[in-house]
Amino acid sequence: MAADQPVTTMTTLIQTGRYSVMAAQPTTGQRDLLSVTRAITIPGDIESVGEAFHWMLRDSGYRLAADVVLSEEAKAMLALPLPAVHRRFEPMPLQTVMGLMIGPAFHLIQDPVHRLIAFERCAEFSVPNATGGAQ
């Protein structure tokens, strides 16, 4: 009956000590760069949401899309002052942190081929007029 048992499960384990083994496979963060879980504290000299994104993405392998690709609304959102509550995040996936920072008015768009981040306005949020009301 031993021949009926799958051998593949044993080949994916590496012995790291006398009584311990670990799986020989990539972590979730290695497979999906934006799913890396990190505690983030944004330095005090960063003033805008866009600067915070550049700072957070610096070691992720991703970068913000060029301004010519971004909509005027997305550029305006990135130019907003960084709220104090968005300067420190407990450990959570990078993609979740970015979603919190852009808020419910935008969707995060990722281009995994070119490793670019862009934003798309959510359809359910109407555009305010000059008086601040919705159109």
Image (cartoon, rainbow, N blue to C red):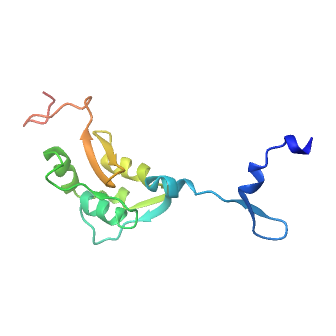
In this rendering, position of residue 109 left or right of residue 95? left
* Residue depicted at 14% across the width and 31% down the height: 133
Q: Quadrant of residue 14?
A: bottom right
* Residue depicted at 48% across the width and 62% down the height: 39
* Residue depicted at 35% across the width and 62% down the height: 57
In this rendering, position of residue 135 left or right of residue 122? left
Quadrant of the frame with the C terminus: top left
From the top left corner, tell me how far across and down residue 50 is, in percent: 25, 58
54 and 14: which is toward the camera: 14
The total number of labels drawn is: 0
From the top left corner, tell me how far across and down residue 56 is, in percent: 36, 63
Q: Residue furthest right?
A: 1
105 and 114: which is toward the camera: 114
From the top left corner, tell me how far across and down residue 103 is, in percent: 32, 44
In this rendering, position of residue 75 left or right of residue 96? left
* Residue depicted at 16% across the width and 44% down the height: 73
Q: Residue furthest front?
A: 3
Quadrant of the frame with the N terminus: top right
Q: Is residue 120 above or below residue 50?
A: above
8 and 38: which is toward the camera: 8
In this rendering, position of residue 104 left or right of residue 35? left
From the top left corner, tell me how far across and down residue 58 is, in percent: 35, 67
